[in-house]
């Protein structure tokens, strides 16, 4: 893809949107996206989420400098963290999306690239998660769009000068950083063809709509039970990923029929196994019957 084609891509993606914003971390990718948007004749609002980390003041200063350079309006948002668990990355992601949703009612562009998409697919695959999780990062979800999701990061480098260098992007305690630094994907999947195939399997498994199956868990094989438990937890505990060992423990328990209500805890949350189904209690007294069954609103 040429640079002219890249600019034309953004112009097409924007369409006639009169209310456009960019989730602007002031990092490499969002800086490049903002500069490309200006080249495309667009005037998006820049939404910068302050996560309150040690590097947040530096990131905010870079965002202010770049917004002045591009003559784009900048709005700084404060992240409000919840206590749902899942580690810093998951908690920060939820806080970021909540801040963006509350601040902007129009379209919000996210700066993830094809490289981010490939890495995420492999991270989920290598973590031992089931195919339910193998499809990821859609181009559009609600008001959020990823106009660069088919673009390799190498095409953006010229427009990312002066961006903020987040020290967390160099910390091996994060799986993505470790995978990126290892260089393994450049050796085994340089074009992302394998990631495409893995994601395709995930799409097909999702079409099975496992969470809507009206079959008691104990009547399924262990393999299907694990898939169904994964799908159920994804529905009941939105935004929370749990360890594979917990999923298998729950699936094994579900294979042993019992008239008793059994309680399982992970990531600071509780789920109940009752009558071959996973349910959430809406009251402290689980025997009150105030529960939401899998697939119900």
Image (spheres, rainbow, N blue to C red):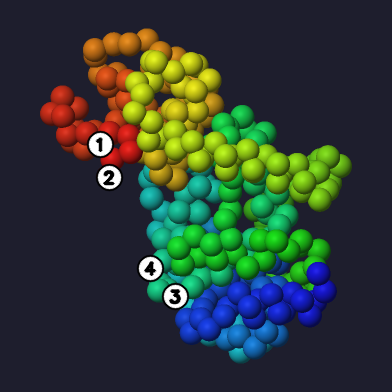
Q: Which residue is mark 1?
A: 292
Q: Is residue 232 left or right of 15 when viewed as pictured?
A: left
Could you tell me which residue is drawn at 39 percent across and 40 percent down? 235
Pick the front one: 5 or 68: 5
Could you tell me which residue is drawn at 63 percent across and 78 percent down? 12
Q: Which residue is mark 4?
A: 102
Image quarter in which the N terminus is found: bottom right
Please name which of the two marks, 2 or 4, marks the residue nearer to the observer: 2
> Quick check: marks 2 and 1 in contact, CB under 8 Å?
yes
Could you tell me which residue is drawn at 37 percent across and 10 percent down? 256
In primary-sequence order, the first of circles 3 and 1 is 3
Q: Which residue is mark 2?
A: 297
For residue 127, which numbered disc appears in the image? none
Q: Which residue is mark 3?
A: 106
Separation (CA) of disc 4 from disc 3: 11 Å
> Quick check: marks 3 and 1 in contact, CB under 8 Å?
no
Image quarter in which the C terminus is found: top left
Please name which of the two marks, 1 or 4, marks the residue nearer to the observer: 1
Give the percent coordinates (x, y) of residue 208. Answer: 49, 36
Q: Is residue 238 left or right of 208 when viewed as pictured?
A: left
Query: Mark 1: few, some, or many residues within 10 Å (few <14, many ≥20)?
Result: some
Separation (CA) of disc 3 from disc 1: 32 Å
> Quick check: marks 1 and 4 in contact, CB under 8 Å?
no
Establish if 12 lies above or below 204: below
In primary-sequence order, the first of circles 2 and 4 is 4
Could you tell me which residue is drawn at 60 percent across and 64 percent down? 146
> The residue tagged with tag 3: helix, strand or loop?
loop
Q: Is residue 93 left or right of 29 when viewed as pictured?
A: left
């Amino acid at each position: 893809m040429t640079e002219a084609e890249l600019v034309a891509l953004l112009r097409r993606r924007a369409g006639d949107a009169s209310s456009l914003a960019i989730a602007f971390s002031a990092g490499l990718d969002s800086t490049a996206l903002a500069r490309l948007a200006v080249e495309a004749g667009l005037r998006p609002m820049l939404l910068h989420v302050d996560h309150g980390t040690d590097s947040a003041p530096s990131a905010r200063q870079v965002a202010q400098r770049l917004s002045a350079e591009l003559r784009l309006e900048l709005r700084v948002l404060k992240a409000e963290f919840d206590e749902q668990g899942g580690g810093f990355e998951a908690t920060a992601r939820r806080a970021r999306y909540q801040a963006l949703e509350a601040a902007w009612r129009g379209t919000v562009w996210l700066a993830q690239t094809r490289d981010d998409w490939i890495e995420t697919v492999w991270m989920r695959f290598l973590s031992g998660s089931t195919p339910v999780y193998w499809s990821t990062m859609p181009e559009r979800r609600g008001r959020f769009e990823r106009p660069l999701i088919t673009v390799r990061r190498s095409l953006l480098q010229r427009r990312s000068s002066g961006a903020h260098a987040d020290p967390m992007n160099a910390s091996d305690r994060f799986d993505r950083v470790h995978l990126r630094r290892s260089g393994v994907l450049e050796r085994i999947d340089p074009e992302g063809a394998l990631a495409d195939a893995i994601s395709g399997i995930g799409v097909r498994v999702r079409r099975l709509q496992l969470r809507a199956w009206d079959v008691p868990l104990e009547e399924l094989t262990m393999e299907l039970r694990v898939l169904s438990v994964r799908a159920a937890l994804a529905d009941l505990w939105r935004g929370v990923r749990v360890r594979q060992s917990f999923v298998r423990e729950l699936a094994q328990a579900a294979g042993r029929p019992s008239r008793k209500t059994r309680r399982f805890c992970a990531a600071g949350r509780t789920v109940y196994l009752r009558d071959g189904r996973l349910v959430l209690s809406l009251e402290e007294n689980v025997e009150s019957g105030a529960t939401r069954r899998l697939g119900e609103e």
